[in-house]
Image: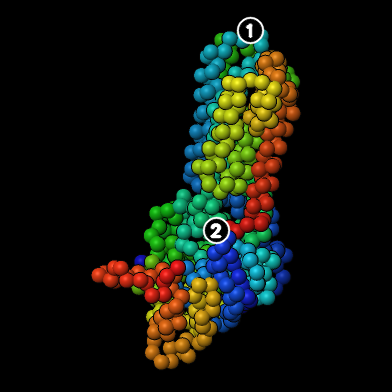
Amino acid sequence: MGGVPATATARRARPARDPRPRGVTLGRVVASEADKLTSLRSTGWLALATVAAAAATAWGLGMFARPEPGASGAPIAVAGAVLSQLGFLVLGARTGADEYRSGTARSTFAAVPRRLPVLAGQALVTAAAALVVAVIALGAAVAATAGLRAAAGLALDVTDPETARLLAGFVLHQTGVALVGLGLGALVRRPDAALVAGVLALVVLDHLLATNPGRVADTARALLPGAGARVLLDDGRLDALAAGSLGPHPGPWSGYLVLAAWAAALLAAAAYRLRRGDVT
Amino acid sequence: MIEVAALTKRYGPTTAVDGLTFTARAGAVTGFLGPNGAGKSTTMRVVVGLERPTSGTATVDGRRYADLPAPLRTVGVMLDARSVHPGRTAFRHLTALARTHGIGRARVDEVIGMTGLESVAGRRAGTFSLGMGQRLGIAAALLGDPGTLVLDEPVNGLDPDGVLWVRRLVRDLAAEGRAVLLSSHLMHELALCADRVVVIGRGRLLADAPVAELAADGSLEDAYLRLTAGAVEYQGRAVGEAGTTAVGGAR
């Protein structure tokens, strides 16, 4: 590479009274984290794949649904959550762990040595991105299942409280899963390990425990982060779950609180490690 | 100005930095020398707050790095050329860093121009050669127009043109009154651009003296080899020398 300018920076005259602060503020860190997320091409592909998964799964599962005519079409519309939640898990885990794997953490934390604002910024940006992607994914799933709903005579009436809960629950659950992913990623600092842990906690453990039902296993199942998915189950499914379980029967919102508690605990653990340890 | 005082950093049973004290003064280029594993990079990471010291202190302009309200405007840091996400373009990497301090687009373009990266600023950093990565690292260090610079092996992987450019850059930065702490293994390069050198081995201070004084009887390289003779952590052997025990390298 030739033609390199040989002159160094000259100390530029600074305005005597610049009203804006010259240093790090939380708002600036949030803007920086938003910039980081949107500056990766893979973010767009991940969002696209997640939306496609939500719509395709909802459509595919909807083909086999045999609801009574006149029932709500919401369970079919949100059925894609089971697969598409993995996209949100990846979104969060990647934001949390890629910093460390790629070495960007050195640049990031040299710029923000107080460190915690970075994690707070990542949490805000991840939640906002997950919310937007979840709304789009829900819209795509509703559109993809429109034909199925029409054929089966299912209504999608958002003024019906249960329908509203399921639709809002889809968005809230996915946002919660993204934050669990962020907490895991920032805590273990390796995207692969964070993903494996996330899939275990959200999906695999629940299925393993289900093979050996009992009071202990059912209680454990109700306390796994996957309990958040109760917010997108209709009352009939929740009753069926309660009937088959010897453990506690969290309702849709207490189930969601379990997921929120997991996200909060993981982020707190990540913050503790970040605050106390070294960044290398 | 960087002041390191009685700095010790341990990782479990391993002591990486052992009671190190030195100062990198304003208006001078301080060369930071030592064999591989001597603790140079650890010291630099502690100075910029990435690692917590086990004991002792490291301050910049009298303050702990973590207490600086605008770190990038006080200290420019280049620790490792691989401190960039490979999927992000050079421009977006610098923009994201600049945003944390409210540094504008104009300054980002300025440092891209200063480091000669105009033609590749829109390329993803993962496609960069080592030398281009170094230029990007230096661009990031210059973003906040800081009064102190910490550069770990800045000429590593640069072409001869780039080496010359870094030499002039650090001389100019020091001439403007800034403090530059620069590590390198290239003795010839340091002899040309450093005012003073700090030599460490196994985490301890071996020498802290002006270049002219160290190189008084011979070259800086001779002085360095003499100083570090007992403190080399990893030592290779000449072909045919197999079986001989490394003199200073026994762990």
Q: Which mark is residue A280?
A: 2
Crowding at dot 2, Cα within 10 Å, few <14 / some 14-19 / many 20+, comes out as some
Label 2 lies in what chain? A
**Residue at mark 1 to residue at mark 2: CA–CA distance:** 59 Å
Reply above or below: A249 against B199: above
Q: Position of residue B97 (x, y in %)?
A: 57, 59
The chain carrying label 1 is A
Residue B220 in view of the camera: no
Rendering quarter of residue B50 = bottom right
> Tag 2: residue type?
Thr
Residue at image position (58%, 25%) is A207
Q: Earlier in the sequence, mark 1 or mark 2?
A: 1
Q: Quadrant of the N terminus of chain B?
A: bottom right
Residue A37 at x, y percent in the picture: 56, 47
Q: Quadrant of the C terminus of chain B?
A: bottom left
Q: In the image, B35: left or right of A24? A: left
> Which quadrant of the view contains residue A28?
bottom right
Residue farthest to the top?
A: A69
Query: In front: A18, or A202?
Result: A202
- Asked if A231 appears above or below A276 in the picture, the reply is above
Q: Is residue B216 above or below residue B1?
A: below
Front residue (pair B65, A184): A184
Outermost left residue: B240
Q: In the image, residue A267 lies at what x, y percent?
A: 66, 45
Return the mark for residue B208: none
Within-10-Å neighbours for mark 1: few <14, some 14–19, many 20+: few
Do the residues bearing badges 1 and 2 touch, measured as CB atoms within 8 Å? no
The amino acid at mark 1 is: Pro
Tell me if A194 is positioned left or right of A265 in this view: left
Query: What residue is at 51 percent from the left and 56 percent from the top?
Result: A103
**Tag 2 secondary structure:** loop
> What's the mark number on residue A69?
1
